[in-house]
Amino acid sequence: MGSFDGFDKKDFEVFHIEGLEERMEALRSRLSPKLEDIAQTLAPDLAAQTGEEMFVHVAKHARRSKNPPNDTWAAIANNKRGYKKLPHFQIGLWEDKVFLWLAFIYEAPNKSDIASTFLDDFAEVHQSIPSNYVLSKDHTKNEDLPHNEQNLERVLTRFHDVKKGEFLVGQRFEADERFLKDEQAFIRAAKQTFETLLPIYRKAMAAGS
């Protein structure tokens, strides 16, 4: 591997840096190379398992003009030009956590079709997600819900009905978890997480085709 040698305390401290330019410089120099390296390592496996060419996109935070970002990520999707309108896999950090998501965000033009498919096959979707995984309804907030039947139904219904509704599913790890410092252990966890979520990804891609 290249830039990724595990996550350490200094990675999370980037989000304590005051000022947009100062924090962005630290993001670009410290976090973006690590996240790109992880995503480039994971992309070939996802390509082999999906039968689709997969491309890595590193968050640029280009629209920001005042407030520094509170999180950052790399995304893996089957389109070279962008990922936000597509089901995609994310690896990223908040100041206190690392996250691994399969993400369906509000910019997806066919999100109501995907949500309908998930709600129609609710029992299958619910059973395919391990009980220790978490859910999110908004990728911009450092919040998650434990995966259970009630939360999943609530998040999917909002994803279907609300224009800004989103659905993210995966794992989040506290910054002080020791295995995050071990690059090989983290890559194994990421591969396993994304492999576990592939049936949901495939279902979404079939719904959107």
Image (cartoon, rainbow, N blue to C red):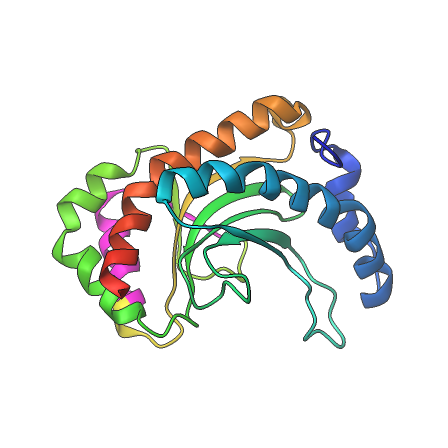
Question: How many marks do you count on the picture?
Answer: 0
Q: Nearer the viewer, residue 18 or 24?
A: 24
Question: Which image quarter is the N terminus in?
Answer: top right
**Residue at screen point 17% across, 58% down:** 119
Q: Against 10, is 169 above or below?
A: below
How far from the left and from the top, in percent, is residue 9? Answer: 76, 34
Report the span colored magenta. Answer: 143-159
Residue 147 seen in the current view: no
Residue 202 seen in the current view: yes
Q: Against 22, is 37 above or below?
A: above
Residue 68 lies in quadrant: bottom right
Residue 193 lies in quadrant: top left
Residue 175 lies in quadrant: top right
Q: Is residue 129 left or right of residue 27?
A: left
Give the overall secondary structure of the magenta segment.
helix
How far from the left and from the top, in percent, is residue 83? Answer: 50, 62
Q: Nearer the viewer, residue 107 or 206?
A: 206
Q: Is residue 33 left or right of residue 183?
A: right
How far from the left and from the top, in percent, is residue 64? Answer: 71, 73
**Residue at screen point 44% across, 43% down:** 47
How far from the left and from the top, in percent, is residue 192? Answer: 43, 30
Q: Against 203, is 43 above or below?
A: above
**Residue at screen point 23% across, 61% down:** 207
Q: Is residue 131 magenta-colored?
A: no
Q: Nearer the viewer, residue 18 or 29?
A: 29
**Residue at screen point 65% across, 30% down:** 176
